[in-house]
Image (cartoon, rainbow, N blue to C red):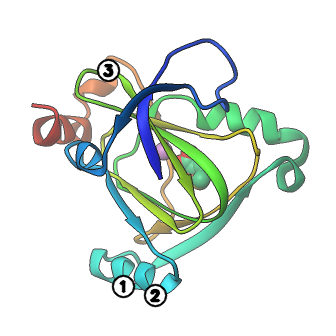
Amino acid sequence: MKAYLYDNAPGDQRLPHDSGKTVDVEGLNKLGVLYYRFPDVEGVNKLASERGYRNRDEITVSPEKMGAVYEDKVKSFFHEHLHEDEEIRYIRDGYGYFDVRNKGDQWIRIHLQKDDLLILPAGIYHRFTTDETNYIQAMRLFKDEPKWTPLNRSEDLDANEHRQTYVSQYLN
Ligand code: KMT
Ligand code: NI
């Protein structure tokens, strides 16, 4: 895992966009973003049972797996959104970027690789993209029914109760 401020330069979303300004794990934690490294799935099982995550699936994002819709999928994952639940991803193979908004509404880019596990709190604005390798395999953890509904950023959404809870807990 490596995290840094996004440079906002033009160019493909899959390029590193590294401003050179590093963000450490503590900086992520202040935003409610939790990072773990689990070399085997035992650690994930323990975390899942502690947090009440009873279900999981695996997704592969790559042109090989997705075919013609790959480019569209990658673009859609990159729309800024939030969820009303935590988003937990455990990387099984490959690489990907999760971008999250910080206190000043700047993007922090988090580069994940195999064995990294990331928890995004409910209500945080974020987006995802593959990197230049165009390949990631990830485990998605969920409590009951999969509920991935992305709510795209808008002024109206700032009034959402999950957003408000997040803001009052982490951005004040
Ligand atoms: C997300 O939340 O955008 C995704 O699930 C993308 C694939 S998981 C690496
Ligand atoms: Ni999401």
Measured as percent of width and height from the top left, residue 45 is found at 43, 84
Q: Nearer the viewer, residue 20 or 103?
A: 20
Against 124, residue 5 (above or below) is above
Against 170, residue 15 (above or below) is above
Left or right of residue 16: residue 159: left
Q: Residues within 10 Å of mark 1 (few under 14, many from 20)?
A: few
Spatial CA span between label 3 and label 1: 37 Å
At numbered mark 2, what does the secondary structure look like: helix, strand or loop? helix
| Type of the residue with mark 1 | Lys
| Type of the residue with mark 3 | Asp
Name the front one of labels 2 and 3.
2
Q: Residue at x 75, y 52 (%)?
A: 135
Q: Residue at x 27, y 25 (%)?
A: 158
Q: Residues within 10 Å of mark 2 (few under 14, many from 20)?
A: few
Whether residues under marks 2 and 3 lie with C-beta atoms below 8 angstroms apart, the answer is no
Give the mark nearest the N terminus, 3 or 1. 1
* Badge 1 residue CB within 8 Å of ligand 1: no
Spatial CA span between label 2 and label 1: 6 Å
Q: Which residue is mark 2?
A: 42
Measured as percent of width and height from the top left, residue 89 is found at 50, 60
Spatial CA span between label 2 and label 3: 41 Å
Q: Which residue is mark 3?
A: 156
Name the front one of labels 3 and 1.
1
Measured as percent of width and height from the top left, residue 128 is found at 56, 40
| Type of the residue with mark 2 | Glu
Give the mark nearest the N terminus, 2 or 3. 2
Q: Residues within 10 Å of mark 3 (few under 14, many from 20)?
A: few
Whether residues under marks 3 and 1 lie with C-beta atoms below 8 angstroms apart, the answer is no
Left or right of residue 125: residue 71: right
Q: Residue at x 30, y 41 (%)?
A: 123
Q: Which residue is mark 1?
A: 46
